[in-house]
Amino acid sequence: MWYPEWPLRRPGASPDEPGQAIGTDGRVEAVNAAAIAAGIRRGMRRGEAEGICPLVVTIERDYSAEMIAFEPVVTAIEDLIPNVEVVEPGLVFVPVSGAVGYYGGESSLAERVAKEIDRTAGGGFLIGIAEGPFAARQAAARANGKPPILTIEDDEAFLASLDISTVGREELVATFRWLGITTLGELARLPGSAVSSRFGTAGLEAHRLASGRDRAVSPRDLPVDLTVSERFSPPLEDLEQAAFVARAMAGRLVEALASLGTAPFRIVVEAEAADGTIRSRTWLSSDPLDDRAIADRVRWQLRAWIDGVGAGIRGGLVALRIEPANLSGAGRQLSLGEDARAASETHRAFAETQAIVGRDGLLQAHPQGGREPGERVIWHRWGEEPVVRRDPNAPWPGRIPGPSPTLVPPAPQPFHIEWDGGMPSRVRLGSRWVTVRSWAGPWRKVGRWWKGEEPGDQYQIVTSAGAFLCEVRGGEAWLTGIYD
Amino acid sequence: MFDRMFVRQVADTDGRTGEMASEQGVAGRRLPIDDLMSRVSSLEPRSSIEKTELVEPSSQIPALLPGQVGVLAGDPGLGMTRLGLVMLSDYAGAGAVAYLDVRGWLSPLAAWEVGIEPDRLVIARCGEVVRWGKAVAALLDGATAVLAEVPAGAKDASIRKLAALARNRGTTLLLRPLKHAVPAGIAHLTLEARETAWSGAVDGHGRIERRRTRLTASGKAMQGMTRTIEMEDDGSNTLRVVPGVAAAETRSVAG
């Protein structure tokens, strides 16, 4: 069951305005009908989407808030069918094999679920029924009836006609296309061993999805119970305290699993309240969950229980358990020199830094074509992909030669130069004048006259205090770089 | 550290190298500083560069180990930001490195030129003193090395805490103070730029090509001595700078 627009369900949000929800990687994760009509698609980069539709209302995903709102939906489904697996707010998988007999068939069961969901949270949901989760989700995405339910009889046949981009993983899809593989059926017909040897774990995973064989087919059995649990006395009443403990528990769990060479695709979060009520929820992921992902999911779930509609956790939290399930060694083979723990810590530290300095404060840069130092850099937020607009390998005649200035102001700064017979003689640095030792230039810069840019002359000016790159336009000098 | 930098040892007039002369100066006849300085390469281009020989850079500037703190002092324009990036590049092979940019002026082009891969460099912009310490602390948790500009107004206690955190985390921390000095006792190595000179540009012709910077190195890494080092930064290869360091020991500190 999938609510594609769930992240956009916020108080005051207008369905008539184009809206999009952005994930932590800066890509569009949800769009409403107005945004789709404007040309925005799921998976686009934020900048690209805003370029297509400048009026689009952009919100960043808040999983905790979304889960609070989604909790009644999960509860409503659980009242009909047990063992609901939450992938994210808005998307759940429900094993229906046991309930089908009770409700008299898949169709009647799906209709009953649809009716219950509609009563709880309104329309906008899609339901797909298939053998595996991947096929079920693809079926839901194509459900357009009333109620929107699509039942798939043969997963493999259904998936065979789907476009290769359905497997996600942009680079892999591009390579498949380059090789002439355009549908999941064509990929599924390739021998698994050949795909594995050419594309590694990612390719094998795509091949399994295309073949209708999801990762849940053969969960590994482990000889020991790896459930981690904590009891609290006095009971915890603060969510942040519980989340802090959950983070440590997630770390312990992942460490224990790593020693066995495995990772969970599914976790069961169980919370015991002081009044004896025990609540549990299953979370599912298409990728192995690491400690950060587990801690996040536990926090979202606890917040949904505490702040959401319902009984809450009365009297505080006295016990918390995290049980791993659907363990698999797939995807856990590290490459030579790869340190998964260090990478995870680095990611967490940079995410924390981003929280301190703001989303626009933590940046990375990539080269692009251009003539001036500032033009040759494309900045992007950490965690997002750069959009390189100009080829850095093109010749770019007239480019400022290296070495490059180490410091480049975001905008040219006023720079005072004293001229003597057309030659620079002194420059002002702060409150003092410094004699020019030598200089290079002027290099004529025509500028983009069609954009109203004035022509100018560029100079490299050398003083005893360092070298500077500057530009003289309309009789005024501007500092454009410092060779620090 | 400085595996991409070459140290030029200037031949003395009587054929001894600067290093040898200085050793004798310290242990033997103890040359006056001015006399010894005159033997060190001058900052102006000169023909004696032909007499130089390459020596191991580690004999001049020791590497900073994980958890050690370095300070890069000197006015903007004297080349310490580029030197800091060169030092940072030595840690980029092991993981991501971070630059905390207080001014928001750092050009990543310079970082790429000294060999830091674009994917390995993360730049945090934070001009507020209040959040500066927290941002550096967070970066120390994740990066293999951090080069942090120190804003005016940063408290000494805050800088000391960060140095302690760097030692605890095993992350190399390079501090680049913009205004005031870093408190004493925290730096394993302090490099302070004294003067710089560029060659290549003459009266409008040519372009700036090569920089020589004279700096002093001190701290525990220098065994309590202060050395004057002349460093040559040749940026002719825009992808990989191969600077040279002309070094001579100028004095020792009795403590």
Image (spheres, helix red, strand yellow):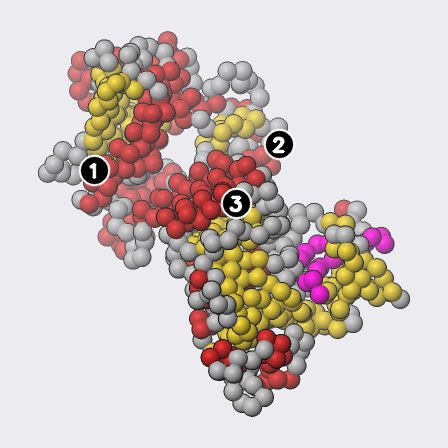
The residue wearing badge 3 is B156
Chain of the residue that carries numbered disc 1 in the rendered image? A
Q: Between tags 2 and 1, which lies in front? A: 1
Q: Between tags 2 and 3, which lies in front? A: 3
Q: In this view, does A99 lie to the left or right of A210?
A: left
Magenta-drawn segment: A464-483
Q: Is residue B183 left or right of residue A326?
A: right
Where does residue B33 sit, x and y in percent of width and height? 59, 75
Q: In this view, does B117 lie above or below A330?
A: below
Q: Is residue A200 visible?
A: no
Mark 2 and mark 1 in contact? Answer it, CB < 8 Å.
no
User: The N terminus of chain A is located in which quarter?
Assistant: top left
- Report the residue at 57% width, 21% height from top: A17
Local packing at callout 1 (Cα closer than 10 Å; few below 14, some 14-19, many 20+) is many
Spatial separation of the CA atoms under disc 3 and disc 1? 50 Å
The residue wearing badge 2 is A54
Q: Do labels 2 and 1 share a chain?
A: yes
Name the disc covering residue A327, or none. 1
Secondary structure under badge 3?
A: helix
Q: Which amino acid does label 3 sit on?
A: Asp
Q: Between tags 3 and 1, which lies in front? A: 3
Residue B49 appears in which quarter of the rendering?
bottom right
Q: Do labels 3 and 1 share a chain?
A: no
Q: In this view, does A338 lie to the left or right of B98?
A: left
Q: Which amino acid does label 1 sit on?
A: Leu
| Badge 2 or badge 1: first in the primary sequence | 2
Where does residue B174 sit, x and y in percent of width and height? 49, 54
Chain of the residue that carries numbered disc 2 in the rendered image? A
- Report the residue at 32% width, 17% height from top: A237
- Report the residue at 29% width, 29% height from top: A245
Residue A53 appears in which quarter of the rendering?
top right
